[in-house]
Amino acid sequence: MLGPRKLDYFVTVVDSGSFSKAARELRMAQPTLSQQIASLESDLGRSLLVRGARAVMVTEAGRVLYRHAQLLRRQMRQAVEDIHNAGESGVGGVSLGLATCGAAATLALPVLARMLDHHPELRLQISDNFAGVLSEWIMSGRIDLAMVYGIGPVHGVRFEPLFHEELFLIAPRDFPCVPRDGRLSLQALRDEPFILPSAVHFLRPLIERACLAQGFRPRVVAEVDSLSGLLETLRHGLGVTILPRAALEHETGSGGFSILALGPDRIEVPVSLCVSDHVPITPAIETVARVIRTLVREKLEVGVWHGVRPRVDPAYARAAPA
């Protein structure tokens, strides 16, 4: 029988990485825990975990169950919280994900400040990560809403386009190339050493497609997924990168970097607010979403985000890459 207790046991084993650690966390005997997992596997008729000498590995069936288990557990917690807070739009807990390296990540402090000022009873949890990871977290129910690069389609996720963000060349201060007519041709970078995020980041394939459209493949000498680590490699003159201008928002001045607009065509990426399309949107979640829309509109109106323009139009939305 597939019940919530067995699912809790299973998730705990996956999260802890071993039966012994999970048993200690659950305060139960390890043989008993093993029996419960074996019973769950028998109920489902599939192997969920592979027992190793030092750790357990999750099978494909186990990964599917883990996603559903996380979603079910979150829905149960949310149901109890929604019932308790029924009719109170400013009460509850909301988890928000923000895509790294761009304007979305700069909203963490403004969103938190606005929520504390106007909705102090709402508990907000903020995390930043790659767009693909955040979409997966939305699908699995790990977070409630996120600001990510892209407009979908992604199964289980609903996208609301908010704005376009332009990508710029970020290079050491003494970078020798001089742009013509205000924009540096991508062609001029064909021999430059690139330091880029890995393929898990939404920006990576976008950058590679733009370079290929100009007849070359970027010479990637290193992949760095940490923004601080990537900028540090640039400070030491190890290469160049392509990122949104907002990635440097918290740098003093320009942080010792050259920031150059690219051409002949702009490289732009859409940024969207996304939520699950199969989990109810609570009043608390809608409150946070409304605050985000307001902050985005305010920042667009005053023009504090360099290289950012309002939401995509329908024609672009149909043509934009997933």
Image (spheres, rainbow, N blue to C red):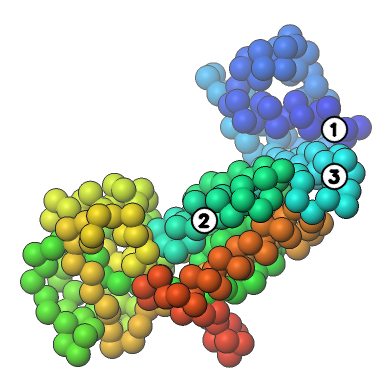
Can you say whether 4 is above or below 30 in the image?
A: below
Label located before the other in sequence (3 or 2): 3
Residue 322 visible in the snapshot: no
Residue under the point 49% across and 75% down: 300
Residue 253: image x %, image y %? Answer: 23, 60
Q: Residues within 10 Å of mark 3 (few under 14, many from 20)?
A: some
Residue 102: image x %, image y %? Answer: 42, 62
> Residue type at mark 2?
Pro
Residue under the point 15% across and 71% down: 191
Q: Nearer the viewer, mark 1 or mark 2?
A: 2
Quadrant in which residue 83 is drawn: top right
Residue position for label 1: 4
Residue position for label 2: 110
Q: Quadrant of the N terminus?
A: top right
Can you say whether 114 is above or below 61 in the image?
A: below
Residue position for label 3: 85
Give the CA separation, mark 3 to mark 1. Answer: 23 Å
> Residue type at mark 3?
Asn
